[in-house]
Amino acid sequence: MKHIITTVLLCLSLTAAWAQYNILPRPSQLTPGKGELVITSRTTVGAPTDERWSHVARLFADQLATASGLKVKMTNGKGTITFQPSKDASLGPEGYKLNVTPKQILIEATTAKGAFYGMQSLLQLLPVEVFSPQAVSGVKWAVPAVSVRDVPRYEYRGMHLDVARHFMPVDFIKKYIDLMALHKQNQFHWHLTEDQGWRIEIKKYPKLTEIGSKRKETMMGHYGDKKWDGQPYGGFYTQDEVREVVKYAQDRFVNVIPEIEMPGHSVAALAAYPQYGNNPDKIYEVSTTWGVMDDIYMPHEETFLFLQDILTEVIDLFPSEYIHIGGDEAPKKQWKESRFAQELIKKHDLKDEHGLQSYFIQRIDKFITSKGRKMIGWDEILEGGLSPNAIVMSWRGTEGGIAAAKERHQAIMTPGGFCYLDHYQADPKTQPVAFGGFTDLAKSYSYEPTPTELSAEEAKYILGVQGNVWTEYMKTPAYVEYMVWPRAIALAEVGWTPKDKKDFEDFSKRWDVHKKRLDLLKVNYFGAPINDQFQYQWPLKKAAKK
């Protein structure tokens, strides 16, 4: 009996100890320590003189100063809190070690990026008030003693945002990136063009934004409701604004991946430049309905030159290793009816229209590769044969990722059932209008990105996981936040934390604490207190269609 009581008390003690470490995503290894380090006005923050390392240290010191009013001193080299390069190659480019004792805090990493992730964990070890936008009094700024060794499971941990259906302001894009960085996500997939709007300035083709960025009205409610608001809608990012966002993301170690859709989802571009469509006599209008359109690019040489010109400007704006070209949902009806397309199929001995799409994608892949970049496409690019250098983004389930990995092509897993954050997350009768389906927090958290169908060697081609945010039904930033958080945090843990360390019950407990941080950051997450600054575009319905 005495042994049982001792065991129970030990378990309760460990549970109480772990309650201090509410880090999201959960670290690979965490060992509780004894005592705590209290930050005071005498605390110093040390880092190497290297610009990126000192930048990380400054980010920490600035956030601490904002919330606490403590003006900690920055120093070169060692301080009370030290950011220090490590020679431990097993940490990789993004891993870190964080050691807290009552006397000092040491964050070690092989790169400034790893140190940045260590800094994010350190912030989460502090009282939640450290995320306050203004000084808070009466808080003891203490960090519990702990030893952390943390390395991400996957190298690609992404979040997507569609700004073509509904345009999002630059300030919100920055906030989105901040929240990604807080949760150690490193790839921002910026979906910039669609049938319903072209959102990026291209100097050589000004009509893309003069005409393509505007639609005469927008659908209301579900697609089946067939209702429109009658209000003109538009918006685009200047090249200077794009540079501003890219720089902001770089400062937070987030890579920005642009997506320029082709050959389908191109109505907005064709409204501006109809000569690149299959019917040059047609009068195109930027689409006011959601869904898949028959209008796609004609694969003649002038079209490829047009797209290469666009991609040249895009590549100059985005230093990203990856360039996304869409490649999804491209109906072949117009190519089947086109004499030119049919002759092209015969000329290049292609099997059919799917082969023609593969030819189209390969041409673009070759161009992007010539610029020293890597092309990503949705899993439809597998149809007709996979382009030599392509990376597949698997969204229609996991089959596309499996097929790509078996062909020794890299794949990013983002299946709709787990990773599409435009799905309902609660009973539709209680929610604003959403796309449909049902993906709650537990389901997103349960996702396993590496398919069991793959061998150990094939599994190496799975780069990681991404959450996708399509905005047909998300007109405001507040509604985007409502749909994204906390499901995106669940996917962040899926991408970072070792499979055997995942535990939804434990995640839920950490989320209960973490939501207080998001309250201070004014994030309108699912379940957040609603107030005047958080307005939904669509009213709640008594009964919403699925």
Image (cartoon, helix red, strand yellow):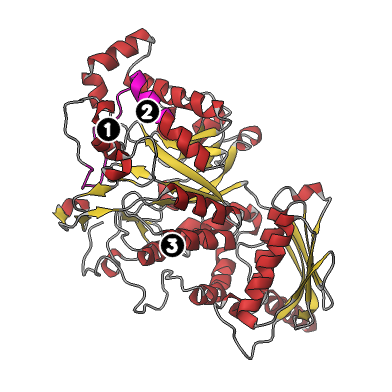
- Tell me the number on the disc at residue 273: 1
Mark with earlier residue (3, 2): 3
Q: Position of residue 438 (x, y in %)?
A: 36, 57
Image quadrant assignment for residue 457:
top right
Query: Which residue is situated farthest in the bottom direction here?
Result: 138
Image quadrant assignment for residue 48:
bottom right
Q: Identify the residue at horizontal 84%, vertical 50% (top origin).
A: 87
Which residues, given as a range, are shown in magenta?
286-308
Q: Amino acid at mark 1?
A: Tyr
Q: Secondary structure at mark 3?
A: helix
Residue that carries the numbered disc 2 in the rendered image = 306
- Distance, label 2 to label 1, CA atoms, is 10 Å
- Distance, label 3 to label 2, CA atoms, is 31 Å
Report the number of discs: 3
Q: Do residues under tags 2 and 1 come within 8 Å of each other at their CB atoms?
A: yes
Within the magenta stretch, is there residue 10? Answer: no
- Tell me the number on the disc at residue 172: 3
Q: Nearer the viewer, residue 71 or 205?
A: 205
Mark with earlier residue (3, 1): 3
